[in-house]
Image (cartoon, rainbow, N blue to C red):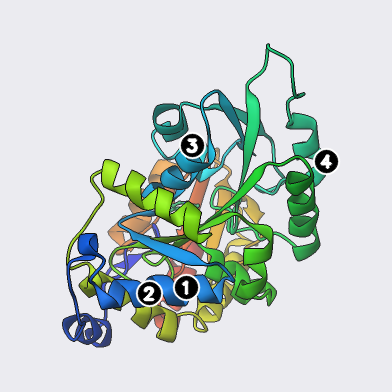
Amino acid sequence: MNTIDLRSDTVTRPTPAMLAAMHAAEVGDDVYDEDPTVRRLETELAARFGMEAGLFCPSGTMTNQLAIMAHCAPVSEVVCEATAHVYLWEVGGIMHHARASVALLPGERGRLTASQIAGAIRPVGNVHYPTTRLVCLENTHNRGGGSCYAWPDLEEIAALTRQHGLALHLDGARIFNALVATGQRSEDYGRLFDSISVCLSKGLGAPVGSVLLGSREFINGCKRLRKLFGGGWRQAGYLAAAGLFALDNNVVRLADDHRRAAQLAEALRPLPYVAEILEPETNLLLFRLDESRLTVADFLARLEALGIRASGFGGSWVRFVTHLDVDDAMVARVVAAVADLAT
Ligand SMILES: *Cc1c(COP(=O)(O)O)cnc(C)c1O
């Protein structure tokens, strides 16, 4: 019986069709700006999001950190949500690379409001404070259980940051999940954000890669910083080809992942050992166990014994993630397994 891996949407392996597209890629030395497939990926994604330029990088951590570093002059402060990936899971990179202070705000499932952000902006011209330069949003929000921003809220935040001359960065590791779930248009995002990081190696199923989007001038600056990070790469077109394949083939199907996450939530809801569920909006399903009935350690171990892998997500929380390598039959197996654990 094959393993069902619900730990993350990063565990997918390239399909034979994706591998064929990679094999057929036309490549060159990207440090010399001579890889046509990398260039095509960067140009196509930038166009989709209404941005001037793109920069293909190995990871979403790198695209986020390059953007934050580029946006922040010395003695800056970054405003973000308290459980934002850029703060929580990027090794303190804001401190290390941008050497910036961070103002953390408590979000509702990771979502911030314009009025919250307004309250965090430092007064200008007071020697005691760092200069607020950048606001980072995350959509969908990972720790918020794949939650999505409503468009009017994003517009309000963008109006505020513009009014205060702040940069606005989007950690869009799962932006395509948000677009599919809400029906928002990718082209509109370029109007609101100064920079956007998009992951190809999450729900889209590419083996490697994220793309940073922004103005031509901004991206040129980030390209130099990428080289500083040791991230200048050569025939990266083989990887870019996987990204292009993913954009053409694996976006619309994200709706299936969302439907399956909802089915799993449905199955967990009546179970006595489940204390709380963050209703899934996309492909991330976070739920809390009543550990007086079943501990997280036991839950994960008993699932593992049935060939089902999931992640402990801190405290009594568990995360299930649906993705390209989880089909309806697998969901049915998980539904039966979690029900069995209640008996
Ligand atoms: C996965 C993820 C990233 C980037 O992760 P990498 O593993 O560095 O590619 C950034 N932001 C969020 C919200 C993520 O989930």
Viewed as shown, does residue 308 lie left or right of 239?
right
Q: Say what amino acid the circle numbered 3 marks.
A: Leu
Q: Distance between the residues labelled 3 and 1?
A: 27 Å
Disc 2 element: helix
Nearest-to-viewer mark from 3 and 4 = 4
What residue does disc 3 label? 88
Which residue is depicted at the point 37% across and 48% down?
A: 62
Q: Say what amino acid the circle numbered 2 marks.
A: Leu
> Does label 2 or label 3 sit earlier along the sequence?
2
What residue does disc 2 label? 41
Which residue is depicted at the point 41% across and 49% down?
A: 222
- Asked whether residue 76 is in view, the answer is yes
Q: Where is residue 203 in the image (x, y as percent from the top left)?
A: 44, 69
Q: Distance between the residues labelled 3 and 4?
A: 23 Å
Disc 3 element: helix
Nearest-to-viewer mark from 3 and 1 = 1
What residue does disc 1 label? 45
Badge 4: residue crowd in 10 Å (few <14, some 14–19, many ≥20): few
Q: Position of residue 78 (x, y in %)?
A: 59, 34
Badge 2: residue crowd in 10 Å (few <14, some 14–19, many ≥20): many
Near-viewer residue (260 or 329): 260
